[in-house]
Amino acid sequence: KFYIKLNFRIDKVDGKAYTKFIGHDTMSERVYRMVQRRMRRVDCIQDVKTTDNVKLRVKTVLIITKRVGTSVKYLVRQKIKEVVEKIASENTLEQIINMIISDELQGKIREECKKLYPIGAVEVRKSEVLG
């Protein structure tokens, strides 16, 4: 997954550098290639809290294969929020980051959203640890 950049902050140096995860970012070219003509892009930004009380901002992009109205985009966005909120409330920050990197989270979002409308691609384009 060459298109993912993980961001860490150095907390302390004691012979080794101890780091803390502060977020990840997807290369913009990856998102640009996902969106093509006659498709619709649905962005979803939400704040969730993990089981280890870490606030995390998750930014998701989902591609719908055909042109749709705002009502379908609204339903898909609500379903994304529901899935991410449920997964975040059951896992720690480390588990969520591993799910994002291994595409497990994106797969779960796709499974739930394809019940509403045919889905193209799903990507968690950015995450940020808040506070």
Image (cartoon, rainbow, N blue to C red):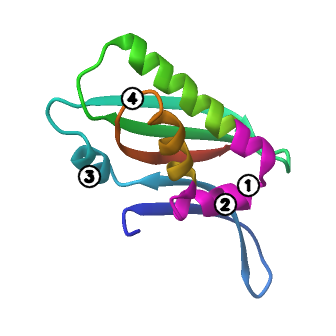
* Sequence-wise first label, 2 or 1: 2
Looking at the image, residue 79 lies above or below residue 17: above
Residue annotated with mark 2 = 21
Residue 113 is a magenta residue: no
| 35 lies left or right of 72 | left
**In the image, residue 1 lies at what x, y percent?**
41, 68
Residue annotated with mark 3 = 29
Label 3 and label 1: CA atoms lie apart by 26 Å
Residue annotated with mark 1 = 93
Looking at the image, residue 8 lies above or below residue 58: below
| 82 lies left or right of 44 | right
Under circle 3, the secondary element is helix
The amino acid sitting under disc 2 is: Phe
* Sequence-wise first label, 1 or 4: 1
* Picture quarter with the C terminus: top right
User: Disc 4 vs disc 3: which is toward the camera?
Assistant: 4
* Magenta portion: prevailing SS class: helix
Residue 94 is a magenta residue: yes
> Circle 2: is it few (<14), some (14-19), or many (20+) Cα within 10 Å?
some
Residue for point 50% across, 46% down: 126
| 25 lies left or right of 68 | right
Under circle 4, the secondary element is loop
* Sequence-wise first label, 2 or 4: 2
**In the image, residue 27 lies at what x, y percent?**
35, 54
Looking at the image, residue 9 lies above or below residue 78: below
Under circle 2, the secondary element is strand
Residue for point 37% across, 69% down: 2
Residue annotated with mark 4 = 117
User: Disc 2 vs disc 1: which is toward the camera?
Assistant: 1
The extreme right residue here reads: 52
Q: Which residues are magenta?
A: 86-104
Q: Quadrant for residue 78, please give it.
A: top right
